[in-house]
Amino acid sequence: MSLGLVVVGVLFVAAVLLSLAVGNKDLSIAEVWTALTQPGGSHAHVVVESRIPRTVLGVLAGASLAVAGVVIQGITRNPLGDPGLLGVNAGASAAIVTGMAFFGLATAAVWVAIPGAFIAVIVVYILGSGRRGATPLRLVLAGAVITAVLAAYVQAVTLSTPSVFDRHRFWIVGSLAGRGFDVIGEILPFVVAGLVLAFALIPGLNVLALGDETARALGASTTTVRIGGAASATLLCAAATAACGPIAFVGLAVPHMVRAVTGNDHRWLVPYCVLLGPVLLLVADVIGRVASRPGELMVGVVTAFIGAPILMLTVRRLKGRI
């Protein structure tokens, strides 16, 4: 497992360098390295400097979505769980559209997306809880209901308000382009808090994987683990969604890719996802830059194209183990 983590770490560094090197003006890896280690006024340094915010955002969003996915799969014990399963994406989208339509919000903002995501998760948890507490099946069904309702609300508002539709349609596809350090500064505290909470919940997630009755017999509080996991996933997913727009398949595909190597032990799943999520997102972003030059494809489109077949191949390999 440790050797595999080193390999994934090397892939992570390679993806970061590739993200800094490829674009409208391609640079060699040597030029990128020189620009990073010997900053000056060279053309290569200016190009690399302009790509750093996009790369840093890709690292934060990729790690956030992948870890949010593995946490949600853990608390719902649903192998098809992703950050949208509990209504997180839908809540963030509905809050942002509401801000644009009724409060003059010009662009997506973290301080709008996160409350919307938390309210959606709280409603899902209340609807998914019975007299004996929340169960995975009830949470999934409640999440599907809330997501459908909020998606209908977003469509109704955007289709009836042309100005909101124009602003919303660029955000909804999902992109790393055009964001600066101000956006990174807004989401960084939420990403750090979500990751710290996810690492703290690793023992609880491992016990919860044994089943609710076994977990309670071992002294674990399943309610505390699920509430903590939902809070962690909400912070991570809402921050990534507010900064980049909804990006599909990273939160679903990466945990399954990692699980093929590490198994279901969250002590390895979470660290692997922190590194492999950015690798998938940055590589998808680079493919989007070169696939339709001189323009570029949004990263959300590319992740759907490459994430779906990767997920299908991984699930076929895991047949009978999930």
Image: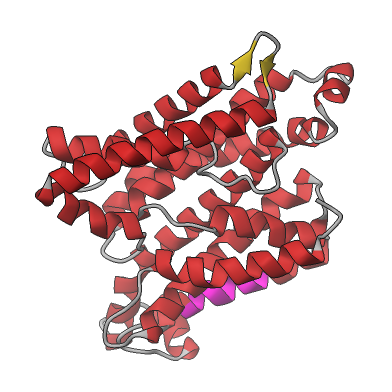
Residue 265 placed where, x, y %?
A: 81, 46
Considering the image in quadrants, where does the N terminus appear? bottom right
- Residue range in magenta is 9-18
Q: Indicate left or right for 25 with 240 as reference.
A: left
Out of 11 and 294, give the one closest to the viewer. Answer: 294
Q: Quadrant of residue 8?
A: bottom right
Residue 27 placed where, x, y %?
A: 39, 89
Out of 29 and 202, give the one closest to the viewer. Answer: 202
Residue shown at 54% from the left, 40% from the top:
85
Residue shown at 77% from the left, 51% from the top:
268
Q: Indicate left or right for 262 with 102 as reference.
A: right
Magenta highlight on residue 13: yes
Residue shown at 27% from the left, 79% from the top:
46
Q: Indicate left or right for 68 with 173 as reference.
A: right
Out of 127 and 48, give the one closest to the viewer. Answer: 127
Magenta span main SS: helix
Q: Indicate left or right for 314 with 171 as reference.
A: right
Magenta highlight on residue 16: yes
Evaluate whether residue 93 shows in this view. yes
